[in-house]
Amino acid sequence: MQTNFTLAQLADPDIANSEKILRSCVHCGFCTATCPTYVLLGDELDSPRGRIYLIKDMLEGGKAATAEVALHIDRCLSCLACMTTCPSGVDYMHLVDHARAHIHETYRRPALDRLTRAGVAAVLPYPARFRAALLGAFFARPFRGLFSFIPGLSRLAAMLDLMPPKIRTRGLERPAVFPADGERRVRVALLRGCVQSVLDPRINEAAVRLLTRNGVEVVLAEGEGCCGALVHHMGRTDASLYAARRNVDAWIREIERDGLDAILVTTSGCGTTLKDYGFMLRNDAAYAEKAARVSALAKDVSEYLEALDVCPPLPPSNLKVAYHAACSLQHGQQVTTAPKALLARAGFEVREPAEAHLCCGSAGTYNMLQPDISRRLRDRKVANLTATGADVVAAGNLGCLVQIGGRIDLPVVHTIQLLDWAYGGPRPDELGG
Ligand code: SF4
Ligand code: SF4
């Protein structure tokens, strides 16, 4: 794609990077076929190619974002299916991240939209605030039906839909070290994060059990917190870079104290962001090298277990598992085979749904901010997963578990919970007695 940025514009490293990305797009349109919003809405402006044109026009003209640009960029799930499909290797992720930041800086959203986004950014990344909000939501839930009929409050209704049926007791929220059982083979950090530590602490507990049983010492680092993905995808650059720097500092301290073989993540949406810290902080002289080091160590837990080769083959069980590939894992990190291979080796019969490449509509805060499109994608995903005839659904991302679990008539668990159970841990509650 031809571009016409001025030399003065190209002096901005973000513009220079976006220009390089724009020039790599050859307008072929292959990406439209796998874009969930284009598949649903059929509008070129809701396809990757259409969004690329909108972004080019906005950045090249040095313009403030318009309501039209914000509408179509907001509808993008950042699922990155387009990157998997693109034959030219267009780095759509960094282009749309730049566009979101530009929109946040230059576009004044309607008041209710501003309020909702500010509320999400102020609550979700902080476990104590989020836990308090869940308590409030518990009392508001009976009025959910009413909210869905009041114009402007459909997002609130969507948020209440995502509430878990019960609020769990505190999990692995504090810094800690879990020694390896027997001789220590390696030492890793595990991201505690934010939302997952409140909504389902059992996921990281399962990871700690499985890892320590296999000679891995697991550290929950002091000072680490939300990875920054939630605010990053809302274009709030300052907040996401603050989170990234804080986490880089926390893990560099651990590396210098006793070394780290990897930084593991059980929520693939966060994993994609950790792997991007090197890029996010590339222009920060004080952090660029440290952030690149952290990104190089970041691994999805399934990716790491597969490479560590500690899960031996087990006899087949009669449990059929529909594996839901989270977009952040399959498109964002290109981790596609490890979770399925691990489940199969643990004796489960792995089934894959039709349209496995399509997003379930969760996408970070998307299911709260774009509830209508999100629901349509969820229902399509639920139908495809149900059609596999499986007994249970497994996925590697909390957002997908909440999104799908709220609708499907099957137990939905994290892949690591099934692996932990197969290799000696407790049976996940969802599977009953
Ligand atoms: S597939 Fe790639 S090169 Fe083709 S239009 Fe889409 S982003 Fe551009
Ligand atoms: S990230 Fe997903 S929703 Fe956005 S343009 Fe690409 S395929 Fe479409």
Image (cartoon, rainbow, N blue to C red):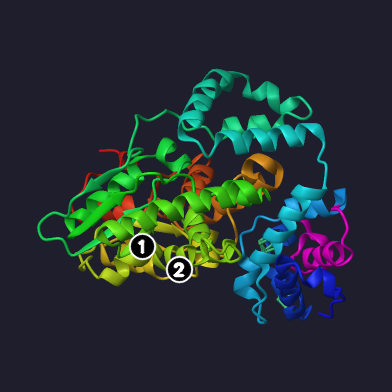
Whether pointer 2 and pointer 1 mark residues with C-beta atoms closer than 8 Å, the reply is: yes
**In this orientation, does residue 354 appear?**
no
Q: Residue at x 89, y 64 (%)?
A: 61
**Residue 394 image point, x, y percent:** 41, 53
Q: Circle 2 sits in a helix, a strand or a loop, which is it? A: loop
Count the marks: 2
Q: Residue at x 84, y 77 (%)?
A: 3
Asked where in the image residue 217 lies, by quadrant, the reply is bottom left
The span shown in magenta is 40-65
Nearer to the camera, 260 or 7: 7
Asked where in the image residue 167 lies, by quadrant, the reply is top left
Mark 2 residue crowding within 10 angstroms, few (<14) / some (14–19) / many (20+): some
The residue under label 2 is 335
Most extreme residue toward the front is: 286
**Residue 301 image point, x, y percent:** 36, 59
Q: Circle 1 sits in a helix, a strand or a loop, which is it? A: helix
- The amino acid type, in three-letter code, at marker 1 is Ser
In this rendering, position of residue 86 left or right of residue 134: right
The residue under label 1 is 302
